[in-house]
Image: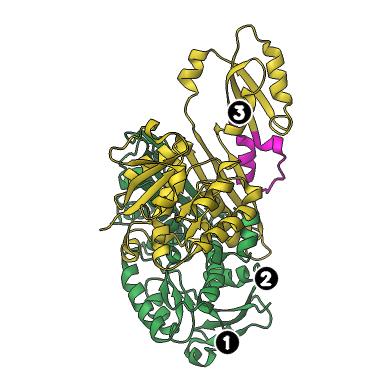
Chain colours: A green, B yellow
C-alpha cells in the first residue's frame, strides 16, 4: 500500500500533535514540516523527516499529498491557507466563526485556480460540533440547539489575563454550568443568557508586590472577555501553576432538544460531548483522518474548498465500505 | 419550490411516525401509503393522502420521489426493500446487524437493475450510532468503543415475555448500568461482560390465578434473552400497565475512549447519546432527512445502495452550503 504523504506547516502545539497523530495511522506518513523559523533550529520528534522553510513551498509541491496547516486563525491562516493552496492540497482548522464565509471564498478560489482540493475549519468546534449541530437540526427541525464549552482552557481569555498589569502567569478555564445543561436535558428548551451558560475560572500568579485586589477587579471587568460572566480569580504560587495548570484540556457539549409526533409533544434529546485531556492533540487527530478523506476525494477528481459538511463519513476510515458495513453499521 | 414527494410502505408505529415527521419538513410532502391491508380500511392522520395496496406498486411508480419502507427487519424488509426498489428510490431501517451485508447486496442489485438509489439500515442503531462509531474510531485509532442501550423498550424482549404461560401483558426495559458507563468515562478502557453493561427490567400483568414465581423463573432463565443479565420482574396491575407502560421510549450511548500524544498517554473521550420519548417517531425523523438527501443524490445521478456512511452531512439539511457555513459551522 502506498502511504498518504503528509506535510505540516507550523510546528507549535498543533503541529506536534499532527506529527504524533500521523504515527497512529498506518496509511499516513509524515514527509516534511514547514517552519517560519530557521529550519536548522527546529528539532522534530520524528527521525528522518525534513524541515523546510515556508519560503520554499513552491519547490516542495510534489513532496506531499496533503499539507496540514497548523497556524493561528487570527493572522496566519487567512493568508497561509490560500497561499499554500497554490502548491498543495491543504487542510486548516480556521476557527473564527464569523469570518468563515470569507475564508472559504478565498481558499476556494486559490484551490480551484491551482487544481487542488482544500478543507477548512476542521477540528472539533468548528468541526465535530458543527457536524453534530447539522445532523441534529436536520433530524429534529422543531427544536432548539445548545452548545456548552468546557471545562477547558481558553487561549484567548488566558492571553487577556496575562496582559493585566501585575500578572506573571495566568490561565482561564471556561466552565459549563451544570444546572443549565440539566435544564436543557429536561426538554424544557430554556432561554439561557450568556451568564447562565458558563462561568470563567482564572488562576493567576501575581508579580511580587502586585495589588491582587486591583488585578482581580481588572480581570472581572474586562469588556466582552469577562464582564458578562460570573468570574472567579484564584491567586496561586508559581509552583502550583507549574504543577496543575500547564495542560490544555478542553471539551464541551452539543445538545438538541426537539419535539416530534402528533401535536409535536414528544420530547427527543440528542447530546454529543467531548472530554479532552489535550485540545491540540485531539484537533490534530481530527485533521489526520480528514487528510485520508482528502487524498481519496482528490483521487476522485474533486477540487476546490470543502468543509466537514461535504465529506461523506466513509472517507474518514481506513476500512473499506464492505468492512464498515460488516463491522460498524 | 417543488416538494419532494414521499410515499410510505407499512402503516404501523413507524409509518405513522414518518407521516408526522414529513409535516415538520416544508420541502417534503406525503403522497401515498402502501398497505397490505384493504386500503379502504386504513384511516390516515392526513387528509388527501391516498392509500394504496402493496400489490399496486408498479402502477404507482411515478407518484413518489422516495418510498420509505416501514416494515420489520425479521421477515418484511429482506423481501420488501429489493421488491419496491424495482419501482422506487427506497429507504429502510433494516436493523439485523449480522445480515446487513447480504441485505445490502440484494438491495444494491435490485436498485441498480432498475436505475434507482436505495438507503438501508437508517435510524439510530444502525444509523446515527453507526455514524458515531465510525467518526470516533477514525479520529481515535488507538482506543476502545462502547455502546450502551436504554433505558428503553426492547420489542424483541417484550415479545419473549408475552410468550410465557400466564403472562397477560408484559414489557421489558433494557437499562444501561451507570457504574459501567462511569468506568468507561474514566478512561480506564474496562473489559465489560454482557452482565456488567445492562440490566433487564420487566413489568408483567399476570393472568388471573397464574403462578407468579414460575413466570419469574421462566423469564429469568430464558436463553440469550435474559440468562446472561441481571433481570428484575415486577408484577403490576393492568391499570398500572396502561398508565405507565404503553409508550416506546428508548435511547443509548456510544462512547469512545482513546489515547493520543507522545507515548499515547493522553486520554480523549467522545460520547454521543440519545434520550427518546418515542423510538419510532425519532427513527421516522431520521428517515425523513435522509429522504431529502436521497432526492438530491438521485438528481446528481447516484444509483445503487448506500448507507449513512456514504451520505455527506450537507445533503441532510434543507439549508444551502452557503447557509450552513454561515450559520452552523
Badges 1 and 3: C-beta atoms under 8 Å apart?
no
- Name the residue at 64% across, 58% down: B259
Q: Between residues B140 and A238, which one lies in front from this camera angle? A: B140
Give the crowd class for mark 2: few <14, some 14-19, many >=20 residues within 10 Å.
few
Give the crowd class for mark 3: few <14, some 14-19, many >=20 residues within 10 Å.
some
Q: Is residue A290 found inside the magenta-colored segment of the image?
A: no
Q: CA distance from mark 1 to mark 3?
A: 61 Å
Q: Which residue is mark 1?
A: A63
Q: Is residue B187 found inside the magenta-colored segment of the image?
A: yes
Decide: is B160 above or below B149: above
Q: Which residue is mark 2?
A: A26
The circle drawn on residue B159 is: 3
Decide: is B204 above or below B6: above
A14 horizontally vs B257: left or right: left
Work out whether mark 1 precedes mark 2 in sequence or the reverse, and give the earlier one.
2
Give the crowd class for mark 1: few <14, some 14-19, many >=20 residues within 10 Å.
some
Segment colored magenta: B173-198
Q: Looking at the picture, how far across and down is residue A109, in whole percent?
A: 35, 81
Amino acid at each position: 500500500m502506498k502511504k498518504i504523504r503528509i506535510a505540516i506547516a507550523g510546528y507549535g502545539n498543533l503541529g506536534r500533535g499532527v506529527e504524533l497523530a500521523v504515527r497512529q495511522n498506518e496509511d499516513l506518513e509524515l514527509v516534511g514540516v514547514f517552519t517560519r523559523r530557521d529550519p536548522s533550529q527546529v528539532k522534530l520528534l520524528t527521525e528522518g523527516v525534513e524541515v523546510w522553510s515556508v519560503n520554499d513551498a513552491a519547490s516542495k509541491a510534489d513532496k506531499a499529498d496533503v499539507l496540514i496547516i497548523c497556524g493561528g486563525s487570527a493572522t496566519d491562516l487567512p493568508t497561509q491557507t490560500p497561499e499554500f493552496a497554490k502548491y498543495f492540497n491543504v487542510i486548516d482548522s480556521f476557527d473564527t466563526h464569523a469570518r468563515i464565509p470569507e475564508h472559504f471564498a478565498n481558499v476556494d478560489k486559490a484551490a480551484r485556480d491551482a487544481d487542488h482540493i482544500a478543507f477548512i475549519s476542521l477540528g472539533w468546534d468548528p468541526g465535530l460540533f458543527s457536524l453534530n449541530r447539522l445532523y441534529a437540526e436536520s433530524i429534529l427541525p422543531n427544536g432548539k440547539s445548545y452548545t456548552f464549552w468546557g471545562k477547558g482552557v481558553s487561549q484567548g481569555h488566558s492571553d487577556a489575563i496575562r496582559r493585566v498589569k501585575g500578572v506573571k502567569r495566568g490561565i482561564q478555564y471556561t466552565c459549563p454550568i451544570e444546572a443549565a445543561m440539566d435544564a436543557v436535558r429536561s426538554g424544557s428548551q430554556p432561554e439561557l443568557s450568556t451568564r447562565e451558560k458558563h462561568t470563567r475560572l482564572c488562576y493567576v500568579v501575581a508579580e511580587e508586590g502586585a495589588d491582587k485586589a486591583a488585578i482581580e477587579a481588572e480581570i472581572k471587568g474586562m469588556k466582552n472577555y469577562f464582564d458578562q460572566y460570573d468570574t472567579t480569580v484564584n491567586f496561586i504560587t508559581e509552583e502550583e501553576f507549574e504543577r496543575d495548570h500547564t495542560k490544555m484540556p478542553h471539551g464541551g457539549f452539543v445538545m438538541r432538544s426537539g419535539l416530534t409526533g402528533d401535536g409535536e409533544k414528544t420530547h427527543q434529546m440528542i447530546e454529543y460531548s467531548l472530554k479532552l485531556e489535550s485540545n491540540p492533540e485531539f484537533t490534530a487527530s481530527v485533521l489526520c483522518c480528514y487528510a485520508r478523506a482528502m487524498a481519496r476525494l482528490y483521487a476522485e477528481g474533486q477540487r476546490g474548498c470543502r468543509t466537514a459538511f461535504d465529506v461523506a463519513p466513509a472517507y474518514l476510515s481506513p476500512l473499506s465500505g464492505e468492512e464498515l458495513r460488516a463491522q460498524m453499521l
